[in-house]
Image (cartoon, rainbow, N blue to C red):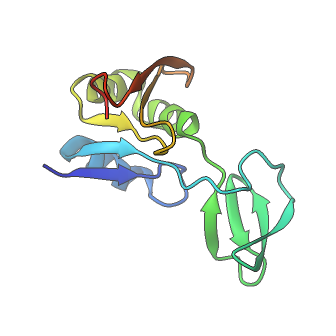
Amino acid sequence: EVTAELIYDRLHVSPDAAALLLDRADVALVSDGTMATGLPDGTELTMWGLPCCVGNGAVRLADGGALAGSTITLADAFANTVEDFDAVRAIRAAESGRLSLGLSLTFGGWIAFDPRGRTLQRLSATHGGA
């Protein structure tokens, strides 16, 4: 079995491509949130030794504007999925086990969110999630 990872920040993958993936594959929503997550638009910082700027949920290289990452959280990824593909479709995918949310290995489990991105339940790796 293969599970596709989807960064659904509306920057990395178009809504049309995400819809196709959600309809045809098991999907784990993931984040590439960087140290810029939570910082306001216009913030300038250095990541990987390169000057970057935060804006519109993205972290872009100051020189040329290439995408260097995002500021998305897992709650944001789920909220975007619900908003763009409607709650029924997203929740149905989650209930069928085709849509899940990934977590960092430091937690060692899974976290469940409601359609508004609020935490519903935390599951440890030993309790049937990861």
Instruction: Tell me which residue sits at (57%, 20%) in the image.
Output: 118
Name of the residue lying farthest toward the top: 120
Tell me where residue 47 appears, x and y as whole percent.
73, 71
Q: Position of residue 20 (x, y in %)?
A: 27, 50
Q: Quadrant of residue 102?
A: top left
Residue 69's place in the image compared with 5, above or below, is below
Q: How many marks?
A: 0
Does residue 111 lie above or below 73 as drawn? above
Give the farthest residue toward the bottom: 63
Q: Nearer the viewer, residue 97 or 85?
A: 97
Q: Compared with residue 85, is residue 21 higher up or lower down, i.e. above or below? A: below
Residue 119: quarter of image: top right
Q: 89 and 47: which one is in front?
A: 47
- Left or right: where does residue 93 sit relative to residue 123? left
Residue at 70% from the left image edge and 69% from the top image edge: 60
83 or 4: nearer the viewer: 4
Depth order, front residue of 74/108: 108
Q: Is residue 120 above or below residue 129?
A: above
Q: Position of residue 88 (x, y in %)?
A: 34, 21
| Quarter where residue 76 is shown | top right
